[in-house]
Image (tube, grey):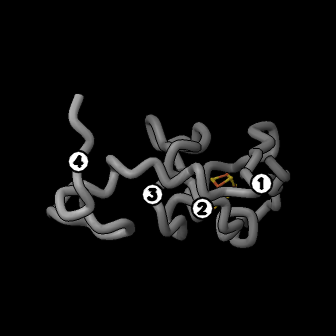
């Protein structure tokens, strides 16, 4: 396969077309990852509302975990959780 020249590859960090953000696996940037204790979770979905990367996963109105391919580990979900059932753990 022929390597692309620098003029052919997309500029890093840019979204070059609408709707393509999910293709960037930004989870690689993370140094801390969120861990949820589902026994304490009350499914208020505050974490889902605040996550800047749409990485809180919800199914049937319940918080079910995180999309770790895209979560950047900012810790906002842990900070806003009403019952403090999310903790940030070093990768
Ligand atoms: S750590 Fe940040 S990016 Fe990851 S799920 Fe929580 S709020 Fe979203
Ligand atoms: S903010 Fe906390 S309690 Fe609410 S859904 Fe998220 S993890 Fe569960």
Of marks 4 and 1, which one's residue comes earlier in the chain?
Answer: 4
79 is higher (above) or lower (below) than 86: below
Q: Is residue 49 above or below residue 4?
A: below
The answer to which of marks 4 and 2 sits earlier in the sequence is: 4
Q: Residues within 10 Å of mark 2 (few under 14, many from 20)?
A: many
Of labels 3 and 2, the one closer to you: 3
Image marks 1 and 2: residues in contact by CB distance under 8 Å:
yes
Q: Is residue 23 left or right of residue 81?
A: left
In the rendered image, the quadrant that contains the N terminus is top left
Residue 59 at x, y percent in the picture: 46, 36
Q: Which residue is mark 3?
A: 54
In the shown orientation, is residue 25 left or right of residue 34?
left
Circle nearer the N terminus (3, 1):
3
Point 75% across, 45% down: residue? 36
User: In the image, which disc is placed on residue 86?
Assistant: 1
> Gap between marks 4 and 1, in whole Å?
43 Å
| Mark 3 and mark 2: Cα distance apart in space | 10 Å
The reply to whether the residue tagged 2 has its Cβ within 8 angstroms of ligand 2 is yes
Badge 1: residue crowd in 10 Å (few <14, some 14–19, many ≥20)? many
Disc marking residue 49: none
Q: Is mark 1 within 8 Å of ligand 2?
A: yes
Q: Secondary structure at mark 2?
A: helix
Q: Could you tell which of marks 3 and 2 lies nearer the N-terminus?
A: 2
Find the distance from the CA under tag 1 to the CA under tag 2. Answer: 9 Å
Tell me the quadrant of ligand 1.
Answer: bottom right
SS at circle 1: strand
Please, what secondary structure does the residue beneath circle 3 have?
Answer: loop
Mark 2, residue position: 47
The residue that appears at 60% across and 58% down in the rendered structure is: 29
Does any atom of ligand 1 lie closer than 8 Å to the CB of label 3?
A: yes
């Amino acid at each position: 396969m022929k390597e692309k020249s620098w003029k052919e590859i997309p500029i890093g960090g840019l979204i070059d077309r609408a709707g393509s953000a999910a293709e960037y696996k930004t989870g690689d940037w993370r140094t801390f990852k969120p861990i949820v204790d589902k026994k304490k979770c009350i499914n208020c979905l505050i974490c889902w509302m605040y996550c800047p990367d749409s990485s809180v996963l919800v199914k049937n109105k319940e918080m079910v975990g995180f999309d770790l391919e895209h979560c950047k580990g900012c810790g906002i979900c842990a900070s806003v959780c009403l019952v403090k059932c999310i903790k940030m753990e070093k990768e």
